[in-house]
Image (cartoon, coloured by chain):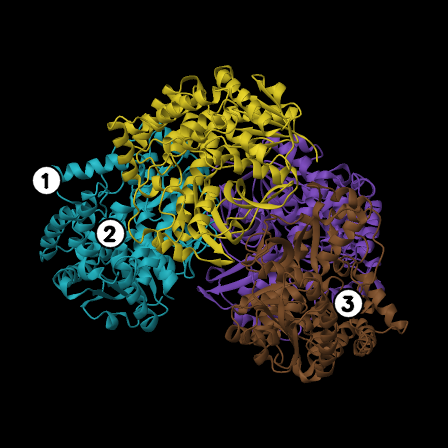
Chain colours: A purple, B brown, C cyan, D yellow
C-alpha cells in the first residue's frame, strides 16, 4: 500500500483537527506520510497552531506523519496524492457580509444558499480554478476532495473548467443517515437512504431498511422534520407537511419552503443582538484556537463539535479510503450526473448515491425526481450553471441573471441593487465583475 | 366548402361581439351557418343581449347566420364543428377573490398566475373535463378552441385527460407581433417572432425581419419593455434589463421578475380605492352591456377595446380558418410540446410557433430555452402539472404541493393558510378538494 | 437469517446439479430449507433423477435440505422466496429446429440470437407470463431469477408485462471476468469490467485494474478474441480488429460481426455429420443423466462442465445471496435501464453492472455507448421490443416486423418464408400467432 | 427584390439544363442575374456545352442572365448568393467502381447506399469541406444547396464541420408527393405527406388528405410499392407487406428490406450484359450532350427525363425561392434534427418536413419514429456519423468501423477486404486514408 501525500488548502481552518483525527482513526488503511497545511499569509497563525496540534495528536497516536505548514501552494502541491480544499475566500468577515447584506433587502442571508451563497460562489470559483491550473501542472493524477462551499457549484466549476479529478463533499448525507440509524436503532449496514438533488438542495426519497422502503411510515412520525445543521435554525413543520412532501428535505430546503419564517428567525437573531452566524462562528473559533494552542491538548477537542462540521472528517476520510484503496463503497457525493437523475442535465454536478472506488465516483441510477421537487431542483440548477458562467466570464449582466434565477430573490430591481452592494462590499474579491451589464 | 356549426361556451361573455365581428370579417372563408351561445342560467341575460346584438350585426353585414342562446350544453354540442370555451367559473365575483385574497398574504393577486390563477385553474379544470366528456360523446370530431384561463393549464388538462382535439389560445402573441410591426413600420409578412415557453410565461427569443434576427438591437431600444396587456400595470424596467435578459418577456413575466413592485402596484390600487381589476371589469361590463342592449348598435362597439381582449377574435378566427380550410399557416398556440422545446417534457402543453392546418397544430422545433429562462419555465411547468393532478384527484395535499411550487408563493405555512382560505372562499367550486392532506 | 424456499422451474435441466453444488458452497449465508424441482410431465424422469442426485449431494455435504419434485407448479410456488426459471419450451427438439431451419435459408441458426433465438422467444414469453400470473398471486414478494433464454428479452417481457420482481442472468460476464483474472493473474478484487449492452449483445468497454483502464493494452494483445461460450465456434479475428473496435465483444457478437464465417462454420458442422449443437447437447445430456443416475455419484460430476454453463450456479447463487442477505455487491445482470445507458430506452432491459442488494438491481450509470456499437445495440433493442409485442399480441405481422429488424436476416421475402416454416415446425408452441399479417 | 448570383459547382453535370429550365420558370420571383457554372478541367467541355445551351435557353425565354463557365472556384464564389453543389468526385468512372466492386463480395453495389455510397461519401466529404472553407471566406452569407450524394451525410459533414449555411436536397419526397397526387387525383394543396428519417432512408408515415390520415387505406392498395427512382430496379412487395410496415418506404429501402432480391437483380443485369447503372448513365449522357450541343436546341430536351433526376430543379428552385424571398413554405429537406425526430440525435441531419424561409429550414416536430423503423434508422445514423468521422480524421480503422455498421455489410473480414479494394481502386481520392487501422 503506497504512502500518501495529503495537501489541505485552507489548512488554517478550525476543522483541521477533525481531519487529523480522521486520519488517525483510518491510519491502517490510509498511511498518510506527509500532511501539508497550506494557507495564505493571513491564515498563517491559525495554520501554525493547527500544525502544532496535529503533531501532538499524531505523536500521541503513535503515528509518524510529517506535518508542515506551507504558504507556497505550488510547492506543496507537487507530487500530492490527495488535495482537500476547505478554503473560504475572504474569511469569516466575508461570510458575515453574505449573511448580513441580504437581510437589508428582506432576503435570506446565508453563506451557501441564496444571495450570500451566490456571492460566496463568485469569490471562490476564480480561486479554485487557479488551484486547478496548478494541480493540472503539478500533480495531474491527484484527487481533489472539495469541501469548499457552495460545494456543488464549486465542484461543477472544477469539473467543467479543468481536467482535475474532483469529488465534492458535504456532511449532510452522513448526518442524515446517522440520525436515522439512531432513530431506528439499527446498524448502518441495514439502512440505505437514496439521496437525490443538488448540494444543499437534496432530498431523501427512499429509506430502505433491510431492503424495504420505510420512508412513508417515517414521514408520518415527522422524522426528518428537525434541522440537522447546527447553523440552520429549527422551525416546526406544519402537521402532515412531510407526508405531503413524500420525502425528507435537506435542512437547507427550509430556506426555500419556509422562507418567511426563516427570514424572521434571522432578523430576530439580529434584533436580539446575537449577531450573524459568522460572528458566532468567529467567537467559537477564537475559543477553539485558544484550546488548540494549549500544549496539553493532544486529541480532537470536544468543543469542535459545536462548530457545525460533524462527520466532516468521516466523509472526507472514508471517500479517500475508497479512492486510495480501490475499495468499492457507496458514498453520497457531488459528481457529474451523467443521466443518473433524468430531470437534470447530464453534465451538471448532482449530490447522490455513488459507488466510489479508485476510478472515482459512479452514480447509481435513480431516474426521475419526485414531481413536487423537480421544478425547484431545475430552477436551482439553472441558477448554479448561470453563476458558474458569470464567474468564468466575469460578466456582471450574467451575474444578475444568475441571481434573478435564485428562488430566494424576488424582484430584479431589488436584486440589482443587492448585487451592486455585494460586489462593492466584497472589494477585490469581486472587482473582476465589471460595471452595468458589460464586462 | 362545408358550413360551420360554432358553439361558444360562455356565450354571455362581453367578448362575444368581438367574436361575431371576427366571423363577419372572415365570412367568405368561414361560412358559419349556426352560432350557439351557451351559458348557464346565471348568465342568461347577458347571453340574450349578446345574441340580439349578434343578430343585428350579422344582419347589417348582410350575412345569414342562425344565432341562438342555449342553456342546454349537450343539446348545443350535438353536431358542432367548432367549440370555443371562454367561460369563467364563478364569474367576476370569483375573479375578485382570486385577486384580493392573496394580497392579504402579501402575495400577488392575479386571475391567471400566482395563487389566484391557481384557484381559477382548480375551479375550471373539473368543468372543462365535463364539457370534454360531452364533446367525446356528441361531436368527437369537433375542434375545441380554448380561451378559458389559465389557458395553458386548461389545455393541458384537456389533452391529457380527454380525447378531445383542442388548441389553446391567447392574444398575447398577436399583440406582441402587432406592436413590433407598428414599431418597425413593416408588414407582418416580413416579421417572424419566435415564441417559446408556457401560456402567460412565454418569451420572444428571436425577431426575424426579412430572415435576420434583429432582437438584440430591439432590446437596446427597450422594445418589449411596456406591458401589452391592459390588465397588467406597467412598470419601468431597469436600464439594460432587456439586453441582459436577451429576450422579450411576456407582460405576465413582470409578476415574476418584479414581484415586489407589482405587489406594491396592486396594493396601491386598493389603497387608492380603485379596487380590484375584477371590480373594474365589472364596471366596464356594466357599461358594455348597456351599449350592447341599445337596438341601434349594430357593429362591434369601440368601447369593447378597453376590456383587454384586443385581437382575441383575430386569434380565434384565424386559427379556425386554418383548421377548417386546411390552410397551412403559422400561429402561436398552446399545444403538446412533443420535443419542440427540449427543456420541457414532451407531454406538456407549450405556447409556441406552430404550423396549423386541418391536422391541428404542429410545433416548429426550437431546441433549448435560453439558459436564463429555462429554470423558471421548468419550475412553472412543474407547478402546472401538479395543479392538474390536484384537480383530477381532488387531493388537497397535492394542491398544496402545486401551490408551493408556484414561484409567486414563498412559504409553505403561509401558503397553506392561503390555500385553506381560497378553498373556503370559493365554496362549492372547490369543495371537491378534501380536508388536510387527505382526499 | 430466515430460511429459504427455492423453486426451480425447469428442474429437469441437466444444469440442476450445478445449482445444488452452488447452494452447498454458500449454505452458511443462504440456508435453503426447501428446494422444489418443478417440471412438466415430459421432464418427470430427468427431474426425478436430479432430485435423487441432489439428495445425495446434500447428504454428503451434511446439509439438511428438503428436495422435492413437483409437476404442480402452482402448489410449488406458494410461499416461495426465490424462483429460478431455466426452462426450455419444446426441449432440445425445439432447439434443434431453431438451429437447423434458418440454415436452409443461409441464415444463422442459433438458440438465443437470430431467427432461432426469435422463435425461442416467441415460444417462451407466453409461458413465462403465465408463470408470472401465478407468482403475482401465490408469492408476490418472491424474486424471480431468470436464466431462460433469450434471457434479456424474457426478462424485459416479465418486467414490462407483470408485477413480478425479476432479475435476468447470464454466465457470460462472470466467464469474461474470470478469463481476465486468469490472463492478468490478479485477484478479482483488483479488477472491474464495465459491461454495457443487451444480453448476448454486450461488450466490455473498460477493464479497470486497480482503478486504471487497461483495456486499450489488452486489446493490442488480442485479449477477448476467443469465444468464451462452449456452444459458440471460435474464429480468428483479423489482426487489429479488437483495437479498432475499442472494446471486447461478447462471444455472441461474432454472429453479427462475422456472420459469413459463422454461417460457414455451422454448415461445415452439418456437412461433417456433427449435427446441430442441440443434437450434441442431447448426447451430452444422455451421458450426464446416466452419470446422475449412478447412486455412487454424490458430488457435481466433472462432465457437467462440457455442457456449456460454466459459472451458471455462481451467477445465480451470488445474486440470490445479495438479494436475500441485503449484501450490496456489484453484479452484471439484466434489469431495467432507467437511463444508465443513455442511447437505449429507459424502459428496456439492459445487461450492465448493477449494485444488487435486497432492493434489487440498481444500475451504475455508464452514459453513452461507444459510437461504433450504438447502432447495433439500438437495432437489436428495437428487434427485442418488437418481438415482445408480437408475443403479447399474437400478431403474425408484428412477428414478421420483429424478425425483419433482426440484423441476422436480410430479406423480407425470405424472412417471411422462414417465419412461416418456423411457426409451422413449432406446432402448438407457436400456433397462437395467426395467419398472414392478421391476428 | 435583389438580384441573384448563383454558382453551380459541378456545372458540367447533365442536369444543368434542368436547373436552367427551373430558373426560367420562376424568373419573376427569382431574378438570377449571374449564373456561373464551375467545374474542373476534366469537366470543361461538358460545362461549356451546358453554358452555350443555357444561353440559348435564356435567350429564347427572353431573360437576361449572365451565364459563364469558370474553372476557378474561388473567383466564382466571391459574392455568391446561392451555391448549388452537384458534383461527383471521380465522375461516373468512380460511380461504376462503387457499383461493381461490392458485387464481387456478394454485396449491394449502389452509388449512395451500402459500400458504394460509403466510398462515394469518403471521396466527397473532403472536397466539400474545402469548398466550405472557400465559402466561409468569400461569401459567408450565401446559402449552399447541396445535391451532392450521399446528400444527407454530406450535408451533415458540412453543418458539423463548417459555418456554412446549408440545406441538403433530394428529389424523392417531391416524386412521392407527385405520385400520390396523381394516384389520388387531387391538388397538392390538399395533401401533406409526413416524411421522417434520413436521406435515402426515409419513410412516409402519414398521408393527410384534407387533414385526415389516409395512409392505412393507401397501404392496402399497395400504393408506395413501386420504385420511384429510375435507377432502382423494381421488385414486387409480398402481399400485405406495406400494411404490415404501416408506412411507405423510400425506394432505397428496398436495398435494406429485400437485399437478396436486389442483389440478384444487380447481378442479373451484369450477366445479361446491361452493365452497371453508371455505364448506362454514361451512354445516356453521351446522347444528352450530343443533343445539348445542337445549336437548334433551345429548351430543356425531353430526353433528360430518362436521366433520373425528375423534379430535381423543382426541388432546388422552390427552396431557393423560399430562402431568397422569405416565403414561408413547407419543403422536405435535409437539415439538423434538433429534436424533431426524438429517436435520432439532436445534432444529426435528418430528412423531414420543414418550414423554409429566409431564416433557413426549421423542422416540424414529428416525435418518435415507428417502432419497426427506429432500429434501422438508428443503425444507419450511426454508420453515417462514423463515416463522417473517418473522412474528417482520415483514419482507416474508423472507416472500417463505419462500414461494418452499414446494414448492407455482414462480415467484418469480408468488409475489410472490400474496404481495401475500394481504397485501392479509387486511387488518389481515397489515399488520404492510411494503412491498417492507423492513420
The residue lying toward the viewer, choosing from A381 and D170, is: D170
Label 2 lies in what chain?
C
Label 3 chain ID: B
Q: Nearer the viewer, mark 1 or mark 2?
A: 2
**Mark 3 residue crowding within 10 angstroms, few (<14) / some (14–19) / many (20+):** many
**Residues at marks 1 and 2, CA–CA distance in whole angstroms:** 26 Å
Indicate the secondary structure of the residue bearing disc 1.
loop
Residue B303 point in image, percent of width and height: 83, 69
Quadrant of the rendered image containing residue B111: bottom right
Q: Quadrant of residue B286?
A: bottom right
Q: Which residue is mark 1?
A: C273
Q: Give the letter of the chain under mark 1.
A: C
Do we see residue A44 in this rendering?
yes
Q: Which residue is mark 3?
A: B108
* Up/down of C292 relative to A430, above or below: below
Q: Measured from the top left, where is residue C149 in percent x and y?
A: 27, 53
Label 2 sits on a secondary structure element that is helix
Extreme residue in the right direction: B272
The answer to whether dots 1 and 2 both sit on one chain is yes
Residue sitting nearer the eye, C47 or C297: C47
| Residue at mark 2 to residue at mark 3: CA–CA distance | 66 Å
Instruction: Judge depth for marks 2 and 3 and give the one in front.
Output: 2
On residue C419, the disc is 2
Q: CA distance from mark 1 to mark 3?
A: 86 Å
Comes first in the chain, label 1 or label 2: 1
- Where the N terminus of chain B falls, by quadrant? bottom right
* B307 vs B426: above or below: above
Q: Quadrant of the C terminus of chain B?
A: bottom right
Amino acid at each position: 500500500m503506497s504512502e500518501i501525500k495529503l495537501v489541505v488548502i485552507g489548512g488554517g481552518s478550525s476543522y483541521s483537527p477533525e481531519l487529523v483525527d480522521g486520519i488517525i482513526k483510518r491510519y491502517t488503511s490510509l498511511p498518510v506520510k506527509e500532511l501539508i497545511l497550506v494557507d495564505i499569509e493571513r491564515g498563517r497563525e491559525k495554520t501554525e497552531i493547527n500544525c502544532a496540534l496535529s503533531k501532538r495528536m499524531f505523536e500521541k497516536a503513535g503515528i509518524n506523519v510529517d506535518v508542515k505548514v506551507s504558504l507556497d501552494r505550488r510547492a506543496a502541491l507537487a507530487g500530492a496524492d490527495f488535495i482537500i480544499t476547505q478554503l473560504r475566500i475572504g474569511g469569516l468577515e466575508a461570510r458575515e457580509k453574505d449573511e448580513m447584506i441580504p437581510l437589508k433587502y428582506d432576503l435570506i442571508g446565508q453563506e451557501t444558499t441564496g444571495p450570500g451563497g451566490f456571492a460566496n460562489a463568485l469569490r471562490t470559483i476564480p480561486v479554485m480554478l487557479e488551484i486547478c491550473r496548478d494541480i493540472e501542472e503539478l500533480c495531474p493524477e491527484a484527487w481533489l476532495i472539495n469541501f469548499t462551499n457552495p460545494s456543488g457549484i464549486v465542484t461543477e466549476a472544477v469539473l467543467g473548467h479543468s481536467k482535475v479529478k474532483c469529488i465534492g463533499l458535504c456532511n449532510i448525507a452522513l448526518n442524515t443517515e446517522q440520525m436515522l440509524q439512531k432513530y431506528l436503532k439499527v446498524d448502518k449496514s441495514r439502512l440505505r437512504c437514496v439521496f437525490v438533488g443538488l448540494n444543499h438542495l437534496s432530498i431523501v426519497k427512499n429509506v430502505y431498511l433491510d431492503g424495504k422502503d420505510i420512508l412513508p411510515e417515517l414521514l408520518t412520525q415527522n422524522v426528518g422534520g428537525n434541522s440537522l445543521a447546527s447553523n440552520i435554525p429549527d422551525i416546526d413543520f406544519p402537521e402532515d407537511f412531510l407526508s405531503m412532501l413524500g420525502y425528507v428535505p435537506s435542512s437547507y430546503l427550509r430556506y426555500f419552503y419556509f422562507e418567511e419564517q426563516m427570514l424572521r428567525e434571522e432578523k430576530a437573531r439580529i434584533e436580539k443582538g446575537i449577531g450573524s452566524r459568522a460572528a458566532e462562528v468567529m467567537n467559537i473559533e477564537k475559543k477553539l484556537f485558544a484550546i488548540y494552542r494549549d500544549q496539553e491538548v493532544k486529541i480532537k477537542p470536544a468543543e469542535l463539535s459545536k462548530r457545525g462540521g460533524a462527520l466532516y472528517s468521516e466523509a472526507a476520510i472514508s471517500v479517500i479510503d475508497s479512492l486510495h484503496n480501490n475499495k468499492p463503497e457507496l458514498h453520497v457525493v457531488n459528481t457529474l450526473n451523467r443521466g443518473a437523475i433524468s430531470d437534470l442535465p447530464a453534465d451538471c454536478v448532482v449530490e447522490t448515491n455513488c459507488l466510489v472506488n479508485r476510478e472515482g465516483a459512479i452514480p447509481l441510477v435513480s431516474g426521475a425526481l419526485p414531481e413536487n421537487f423537480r421544478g425547484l431542483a431545475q430552477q436551482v440548477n439553472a441558477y448554479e450553471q448561470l453563476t458558474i458562467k458569470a464567474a468564468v466570464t466575469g460578466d456582471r449582466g450574467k451575474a444578475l441573471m444568475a441571481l434573478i434565477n435564485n428562488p430566494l430573490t424576488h424582484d430584479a430591481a431589488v436584486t440589482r441593487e443587492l448585487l451592486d452592494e455585494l460586489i462593492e462590499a466584497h472589494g477585490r474579491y469581486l472587482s473582476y465583475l465589471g460595471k452595468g451589464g458589460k464586462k
